Amino acid sequence: MGQPYDGRATDAWSLGVLLYALLESRLPFDPHPGVGDHAMQMRMRSRTSHRIARVEWRWIEYGVRDGEGDGEGDHEADLNRFDAKGLRGAMEVAEGLLKRARSRWPLAKVAETEWVAGGIRVEGGVQFREEEEGEEVL
């Protein structure tokens, strides 16, 4: 897209996609399950890049069902479903990462969440280090 590349922001995005996939057993920008026949699914898959560019996704397994919930929230998550499995923190992290670059959570913020900090017990806490210079791989 001709934008400057920031590997950390890209890694944060990738972490959000991976976390969503682990929670939902599907990728966030794939066509919604149950929408049309196989041919329609394939046509919709060709528009995946458009959904990614617009950051257009929603919760399916953990989504608000028709007639349930208040419909509030960025991606229509049913908080009770996440809470019942102890995964609200995972939901918050995924939603913080699956955003446009300017509003996406930095990895340091992810590390500070109770869900991550409480789940990773390392003496001195999670720490990041900057690499001096990358090594060329041939």
Image (spheres, helix red, strand yellow):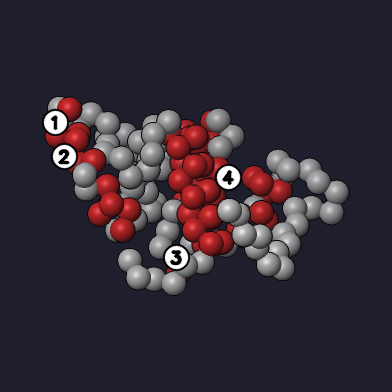
CA gap, disc 3 and disc 4: 21 Å
CA gap, disc 2 and disc 1: 6 Å
Mark 3, residue position: 101
CA gap, disc 4 and disc 2: 34 Å
79 relative to 52, above or below: above
Mark 4, residue position: 89
Residue 119 image position (x, y, % from top left): 70, 41
- For label 3, the crowd category at 10 Å Cα-Cα, with few meaning under 14, some 14 to 19 and many 20 or more, is some
Residue 95 image position (x, y, % from top left): 46, 51
Task: Identify the element where label 3 is drawn.
Answer: helix
Mark 2, residue position: 43
22 relative to 96, above or below: above
The answer, for residue 103, to whether it is visible in the render is: no
Task: Identify the element where label 1 is drawn.
Answer: helix
Please name the residue shown 51% across and 42% down the image.
19
Badges 2 and 1: C-beta atoms under 8 Å apart? yes
Q: In screen coordinates, is 136 left or right of 91?
A: right
* Mark closer to the chain start, 2 or 3: 2
* Mark closer to the chain start, 4 or 2: 2
Please name the residue shown 37% across and 49% down the image.
75
92 relative to 129, above or below: above
Of labels 4 and 2, the one closer to you:
2
- For label 2, the crowd category at 10 Å Cα-Cα, with few meaning under 14, some 14 to 19 and many 20 or more, is few
